[in-house]
Structures are given as structure tokens and as C-alpha cells.
Amino acid sequence: MTTATIQILDPRPEQKTEERASAGRLPGLAGKTIGLLENRKYHSDNFLQELQVILEEKYAVEKVVYLRKFSFSSPCSDETIEELIEQCDAVVHGIAD
């Protein structure tokens, strides 16, 4: 009788995700900088470009920072996230199909 060893791999990530509290609600959008993050899925650009117009015309947003992820299936780059954190009061991550 032969004995074999089977190694089972755990597919979960080794790092635990960092939990953070919500930033809280903005009192309004007038004069704020809003980030729009597109994930490159079909129609996400159309939605976010229309949202940009509405934010600027109806809500008096001072500035919109429009950035794109490399791919919808990959995480956002650290550089893109840092840019949004540094420049924006709030961020909308748009997805579509």
C-alpha cells in the first residue's frame, strides 16, 4: 500500500483588507472637486461624461478630475488612487455594460 500526500492551497489572499470608516456626507457639491473614475466597461465613459456635465452645470462643481483604470478586471493603480485622494472631495467610480 502506497501513501501519498496532497497539498491543498488556500486561494484566499494572505493580506487582510484594511477597514476604514466612511468619509461622511458632503454638505453640498458647489465649489467642490469631484473625481470620476472610469473602469473602461462599455458605456461607462458615456455615463460619466454626462454626469460631468450635470455636476458642472446643475451643481456648480468647481472641478472634475476624470481618470480611467487600466482595465475593468484589474485593481486601480496606487498612483491613480493617490491622485484622486489628493485632488478630490468625493469620487464616483462608474461601471457600466
Image (cartoon, rainbow, N blue to C red):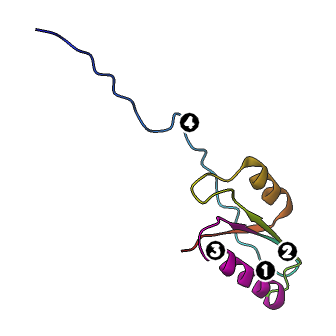
Q: Residue furthest top?
A: 1
C-alpha span from label 4 to label 1: 36 Å
Residue at the spot x=23%, y=14% of the render?
4
Which of pointers 3 and 1 indicates the residue nearer the eye? 3
Left or right of 18 on screen, residue 88:
right
* Closest to the observer, 39 or 86: 39
Residues in magenta?
36-58
The answer to whether 19 is drawn above or below residue 51 in the figure is above
The answer to whether 18 is drawn above or below residue 76 in the figure is above
The answer to whether 49 is drawn above or below residue 92 in the figure is below
Which amino acid type corresponds to the residue marked 3 in the rendered image?
Answer: Ser
- The reply to whether callout 3 and callout 4 are in contact (CB within 8 Å) is no
Residue at the spot x=65%, y=61% of the render?
22
Choose top left, top right, bottom left or bottom right for residue 73.
bottom right
> What residue does disc 2 label?
32
Which of pointers 3 and 4 indicates the residue nearer the eye? 3
> What residue does disc 4 label?
15
> What residue does disc 1 label?
28
Mark 1: which secondary structure? Answer: loop
> What residue does disc 3 label?
44
Which amino acid type corresponds to the residue marked 2 in the rendered image?
Answer: Lys
